[in-house]
Amino acid sequence: MQKGDVVPDFELSDQTGAPRKLSDFLANGPVVLFFYPAAMTYGCTKESCHFRDLQAEFAAVGAQSVGISADSVDKQKQFDQKESLGFPLLSDADRTVATLLGAKRGPSFLPNKRVTYVIDTDRKLLGVIHTEFSMGGHADKALEILKARAAA
């Protein structure tokens, strides 16, 4: 997936077990969908907590963060409770959505790449952020993209 592509709608369970659709999230504004390799690991915790800490800034531009990994619903729930994340964490245990969006990692002990998709309300990609090691960079760059959208 690249900037300008249309993201297909999908449905996955969140950390409470409730089914959530991308189109339902987008009804409330743009979505920052960030894939992380594994809940409760050092890098993924750092990345997710940075998204948590910037929630007011995302809300100020009308956007919301949604995390996604191959972890189970229960593991996502534990992660949310432990770190007080306060935003949806989707369970893509069979990596269907990761495959669909190009976030599925090849042969590796980690199931997904660390990649973030900034999705506009019409499901068009405003930007894609790829970096495995700059955990804080994903939220910062996504916020820059959304601020530029708001200014346009």
Image: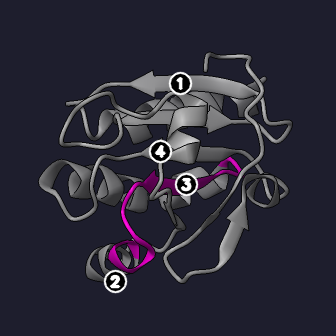
Lower sequence index among marks 2 and 1: 2
- The quadrant in which the N terminus is found is top right
Task: Give 104 or 37, whichever is nearer the viewer.
Answer: 104
Lower sequence index among marks 3 and 1: 3
Q: Could you tell me residue 128's position as x and y percent?
A: 53, 24
Task: Give 80 or 150, whichever is nearer the viewer.
Answer: 80
Q: Residues within 10 Å of mark 2 (few under 14, many from 20)?
A: few
Lower sequence index among marks 2 and 3: 3
Q: Which residue is mark 2?
A: 81
Q: Residues within 10 Å of mark 4 (few under 14, many from 20)?
A: many
Q: Which residue is mark 4?
A: 34
Task: Please tell me in which quadrant of the rendered image residue 75 appears.
Answer: bottom left
Q: Please tell me the numbered disc located at residue 65.
A: 3
Q: Is residue 51 above or below residue 76?
A: above
Q: Amino acid at mark 2?
A: Gln
State the separation of the CA atoms marked 2 and 4.
18 Å
Q: Residue at x 35, y 47 (%)?
A: 36
**Residue 73 belongs to the span the image colors magenta:** yes
Label 2's element? helix
State the separation of the CA atoms marked 3 and 1.
14 Å
Label 1's element? strand
Lower sequence index among marks 2 and 4: 4
Q: Please tell me the numbered disc located at residue 128.
A: 1
Lower sequence index among marks 3 and 4: 4
Q: Amino acid at mark 3?
A: Ser
Q: Amino acid at mark 1?
A: Val
Q: Residue at x 25, y 52 (%)?
A: 44
